[in-house]
Amino acid sequence: MQADAYRRARRLLNDRSRAVVMARILGTVHSLLVLMLLIVAGLLGALLATRGEARLPSAQLDSLPTWVQGRVTGTIQDVTLLDDTGLFPLVAANLSSHNPLHRRAARLLLRILGGGRALTNNFGALTSLLATASGLLLILCVLAQSQRAVLAEAVGEVATSFRRQIHRQMYRLGQLALPSDGTGPIVNLLTREVNDVRDGMYAELDGSFRLPVLAGGLVAIALFLSPVLTVFLASLVGLAWYASTIMNRDARRVSDAVMRDAALQLCLILEDLGLLRTVRVYGMENVDKQRFDAHLERYWAADARRIKTEGRLNTSTGLLFGVSTIAAISLLSYSVLVTQRVGSAAALMLAVALSGLVHPLLECQARRRAVRLANSSAQGIFEFLERRPELQQQGGAQFLPPIRERITFEDVTLQSTSGRTLLDGVSAEIPAGSRTAIMGLDEDAKLAMVCLIPRLIDPKVGRVRIDGLDLRDVTLESIRAQVATVLQADLVFTDSVKMNIGLGDPRIEMPRIIEAAKVAHAHHFIQNLPHGYDTIIGPLSHTLEPDEQFRIALARAYLHDPSILIIEEPNLPLDDIKHLIDDTLARLSEGRTLIVLPHRLETIRSCQQIIVLQDGRVESVGQPRQLQSESKLYRHIQYVEFNPFATGAIATSEIEPGQLGV
């Protein structure tokens, strides 16, 4: 299932096949250049090892180019000595080799030396090899950067496509309108999950051609230098790897068990921290300290075991690889010093080539891990994208005109995505043109009820009607054209004041934005901002006071010109500007249906109707004075939210007349 999900995600690269092909070509060329750089390094090692001094049978001297004869320094029996010959010692050592590949390579190198006389002396060969290595390094850096740029663009576009789809899906899933459900899972999808898919694709594309070419080239170089030693050493390493895999199975099981134990002990410590209220109420401080110390000691012991077992190599595995390495070095040394079947430079290059195979092997393992993680993340993304939207507009939906009579809730039941019941059989009416407050101890239930009106969410059971029309039977556009919301979670966003009020509508000109700000009593403080209406505000920029954010949102609502206005008041003191807020609400409510989630006594007093919710049900409905005498819950909410003795103003001298009642 996960592999299927990753393959589906992988298809998004089909539209970027040119970039994928280019990245693979660049990766292949990159590996070839790395192999060339290794060969140049081997030649440089041979030059340093021989110092340009060569020996060859005197009988072969006549068959060699004339420049070789000019380097002769003497003769010992039938052996001619040559000096300052650059790379010629490699030719001399392999012209009579038993390996036909070595003889052919020697003749090829001899022709190259004849065509480039700079390589026929030590200084010229040294400078040429160093210059070649520098050029290869420069080209490698440019190629690597180009490949990364091409891959980053391709997989970045895939990640952007996923994020765009997730963002669109958020609009279709209505339950996300509830603060209790939160956007944490969506943020996780947009960040970690999408990044996992992106990184998996990057790792796969980066290594798809580059690593096989590099590994194949290293094997080819090693086989060319010494087929017998290569096969033997490769077999030795393979056996050691297989043995370590078997030996590590038990170690991995032990490590997993230790990690689970450490996680359990950490959970117990966190549970102890969460018992603070219980500890204080029941006076169990001494017992709690003993419990905490015991859990802390067990966590320390488990964590110490985890650290000791999480290393990549345990003692047995380390010893195995150490013995294998010593055996390989011993064999190479024996071949160089005793049998003299391999030269010192060739042995060094063989060791480098075989050791270099470790890099592509480890990178292949890392790539597989990245792809497995991408598989899992892609599955989560597609599960989210395939969730059926809860808000759907039916075919032939009607246009909803401005409200004339009432909003009706008919036996409405609603649950959060976590399964908690927010509304349970709620039935209520809100007359058109009235001021209605919704009160209760459960903030999510109140928000859920008002979010049903603009159809940000739909009830699981029951109906919501405006003037007798079921909201499911009218167009979403016409519903939301009639409703404006001012909710505390969505007051301002990071952009200019002008954008926050006008929402980027090109039809709204600046004079209308200023007019709306004046109605909300926001124009004065906006003018005092660093750039006026062009000042960037929001969580990531210039910070406004909570009441200023509230007034910006009220200006936005006024500019929308709704027939139904939903306002959640800030839960903070507004004594200094309460007359401004009251004036704004009075202006906004003219000719409109105002629904308020109140946090001020003045707002409650100004309402014609109050709906009190308890445990998701309507506990009572009525005017403020009526509920004051009839509803215990209403009086309790007043005491909890507005009574100065409950909210902290203990001294009687701090209580203003009229604060204790409605």
Image (cartoon, rainbow, N blue to C red):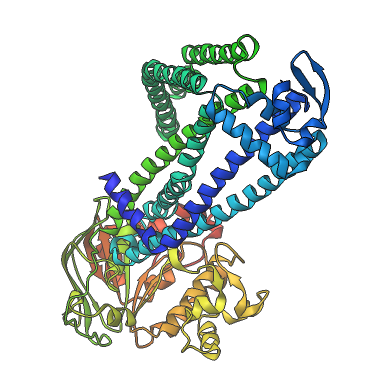
> Closest to the observer: 444 or 395?
395
Question: Looking at the picture, does residue 475 appear above or below residue 653?
Answer: below
**As drawn, which residue projects farthest toward the top?**
338
**Measuring 49% from the left and 57% from the top, which residue is drawn there?**
22
Of 487 and 78, which appears nearest the observer?
Answer: 78
What residue sits 68% from the left and 74% below the top?
530
**Quarter of the image holding residue 332?**
top right
Q: Position of residue 171 (x, y in %)?
A: 33, 67
Q: Position of residue 455 (x, y in %)?
A: 27, 71
80 to the left or right of 471: right
**Closer-to-camera residue (100/194):** 100
Q: Is residue 642 visible?
A: no
Identify the image quadrant of the N terminus: top left
Does residue 396 appear to the left or right of 564 in the view shown? left
Could you tell me residue 124's position as x and y percent?
80, 39
Farthest residue, direction right: 73
Where in the figure is residue 253, as x and y percent of width and height?
Answer: 36, 20
Q: Nearer the viewer, residue 39 or 411?
A: 39
In which quadrant of the rendered view does residue 330 lie? top right
Q: Quadrant of residue 395?
A: bottom left
**Residue 496 visible in rendering:** yes
- Residue at 52%, 58% (x, y): give it: 150
**Quadrant of the frame with the C terminus:** bottom left
In this rendering, the count of numbered labels is: 0
Vertical side of 391 occupied by 123: above or below? above
